[in-house]
Image (cartoon, rainbow, N blue to C red):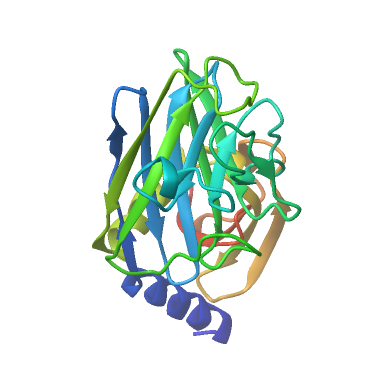
């Protein structure tokens, strides 16, 4: 077996044995928001849902007005100034004051979708973040948060239609389960395939490399759409290495008819 295939097998095995800690999906009071945070050995992934017509804000730390919105506290806020990777990382300036966007934006949105008036945002950053950011640990420790949802996407002086405080409790989960879920989210179909394959949630994928079972790379593609042509491949089994936009990798098995 080729060294490259062996390396891919080692990476996959290491990923499957990795330990993650997850809060699960938590409903945030009567705000209509939910939050989920998952940490790995290197990153934290935030999944936030709420109204598509208002700003959605989280602060990390504190359990009341003085501890929550105090000047200097770290936050994540999706608002009218947010684009794919800008103006998401904020520092609170005190009660009644508009939070300030951090000079260094460390959160990266990997998915931003709306359906039925609800927005779902998935964002990631390193555990440490940047200057002034809350440093998360990959452990079963609790995370204190405060939250707010605005009546519009315009970020104002703490003007909100709902707010509150919560404690997120993390539990250990097997990396196998998380990776299986993620692989399912970007699964390719049809499989087996003859002419083309499609990827569900292709917007998460940056590039695809196709390997034979011997470990020889036969094709490398910068994915521009959800469809990938495989007509030129000979019948057989192939392994796809998916480079995701968040910097991680995933693997899929393809059977070519």
Residue at the far right: name it. 103
Q: Residue at x 58, y 66 (%)?
A: 211
Q: Residue at x 49, y 43 (%)?
A: 69
Q: Residue at x 42, y 53 (%)?
A: 61
Front residue of this view, candidates 55 and 96: 96
Front residue of this view, candidates 190 and 159: 159
Q: Residue at x 54, y 27 (%)?
A: 113
The count of marks equals 0
Q: In the shown orientation, is residue 169 left or right of residue 183?
A: left
Residue 7, image x, y percentages: 52, 81
Is residue 191 among the parts visible in the rendering? no
Residue 222, image x, y percentages: 73, 50
Is residue 215 among the parts visible in the rendering? yes
Location of residue 98 by image quarter = top right
Where 26 sits versus 31, above or below?
below
Residue 31, image x, y percentages: 36, 23
Residue 10, image x, y percentages: 44, 80
């Amino acid at each position: 077996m080729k060294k490259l295939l062996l390396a891919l097998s080692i990476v996959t095995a290491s990923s499957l044995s990795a330990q993650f800690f997850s809060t699960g999906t938590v409903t945030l009071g009567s705000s209509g928001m939910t939050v989920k945070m998952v940490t790995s050995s290197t990153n934290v992934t935030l999944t936030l849902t709420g109204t598509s017509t208002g700003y959605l804000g989280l602060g990390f730390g504190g359990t009341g007005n003085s501890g929550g919105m105090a000047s200097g506290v770290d936050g994540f806020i999706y608002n009218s100034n947010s684009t794919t990777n800008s103006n998401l990382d904020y520092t609170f300036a005190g009660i009644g004051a508009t939070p300030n966007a951090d000079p260094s934006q460390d959160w990266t949105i990997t998915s931003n979708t709306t359906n039925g008036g609800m927005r779902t945002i998935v964002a990631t950053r390193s555990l440490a973040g940047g200057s002034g950011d809350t440093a998360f640990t990959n452990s079963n420790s609790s995370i204190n948060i405060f939250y707010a949802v605005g009546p519009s996407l315009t970020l104002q002086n703490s003007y909100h239609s709902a707010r509150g405080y919560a404690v997120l409790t993390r539990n250990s989960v097997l990396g196998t389960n998380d990776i299986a879920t993620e692989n399912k989210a970007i699964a390719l179909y049809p499989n087996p395939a003859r002419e083309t394959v499609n990827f569900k949630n292709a917007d998460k994928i940056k590039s695809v490399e196709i390997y034979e079972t011997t470990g020889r790379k036969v094709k490398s593609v910068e994915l521009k759409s959800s469809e990938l042509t495989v007509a030129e491949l000979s019948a057989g089994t192939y392994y796809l290495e998916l480079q995701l936009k968040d910097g991680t990798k995933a693997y899929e098995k393809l059977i070519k008819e």
